Amino acid sequence: MHNFLKSDKSTKISLDLNGAQLLDSASQTVTIKQNGEHRVDWRVQANQIGKLTLLAKALTDTESDAVEMSMEIVPHGLKQTVGNATTLTQNDAEQTSRSICQRIPTRRRAACALSVAFDRGHFIRRA
């Protein structure tokens, strides 16, 4: 928090959240010197994936401010991208598909997703 006012200010700084658990005190009152700043760190624990909404407030007797942010809580883990390529040629004119096999772990979170994309490339072969 930054104090742009013309005097030192007693400021109540608070954090409200929806979608996770706050592990520290939700608010504290501090004195911020004129043109000074104060940082507050909060520890948060998310027990489920989904949307998290944060509302941070700085309240004084003369001026106040607040900001609200939303973000997605995503599963802890590693994003895995696997690439594969295959070709259908003129000799395969009757074949309209080709299979690619990919193993997906049986133990995965329900929020995991598999997305498949393909690009139909056009190449010209010159003699």
Image (cartoon, grey):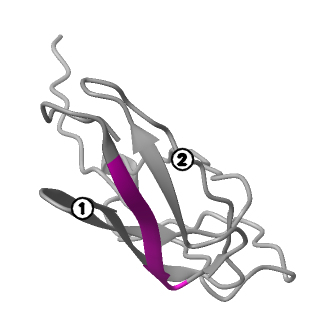
Residue 67 — which label? 1
Q: Nearer the viewer, residue 73 or 28?
A: 28
Q: Residue at x 60, y 83 (%)?
A: 111
Would residue 115 be visible to someone looking at this image?
A: no
Residue 23 — which label? none
Horizontal side, residue 100 vs residue 37: left or right: right
Q: Position of residue 87 (x, y in %)?
A: 44, 46
Horizontal side, residue 89 vs residue 40: left or right: left
Q: Quadrant of residue 9?
A: top left
Above or below 32: residue 51: below
Please give the range of residues in magenta. 10-19
Distance of mark 1 from mark 2, alpha carbons?
14 Å
Horizontal side, residue 78 vs residue 3: left or right: right
Q: Position of residue 24 (x, y in %)?
A: 70, 68
Residue 40 — which label? 2
Q: Position of residue 28 (x, y in %)?
A: 54, 62
Q: Secondary structure at mark 2?
A: loop
Secondary structure that dominates the magenta span: strand
Q: Earlier in the sequence, mark 1 or mark 2?
A: 2
Would residue 57 be visible to someone looking at this image?
A: yes
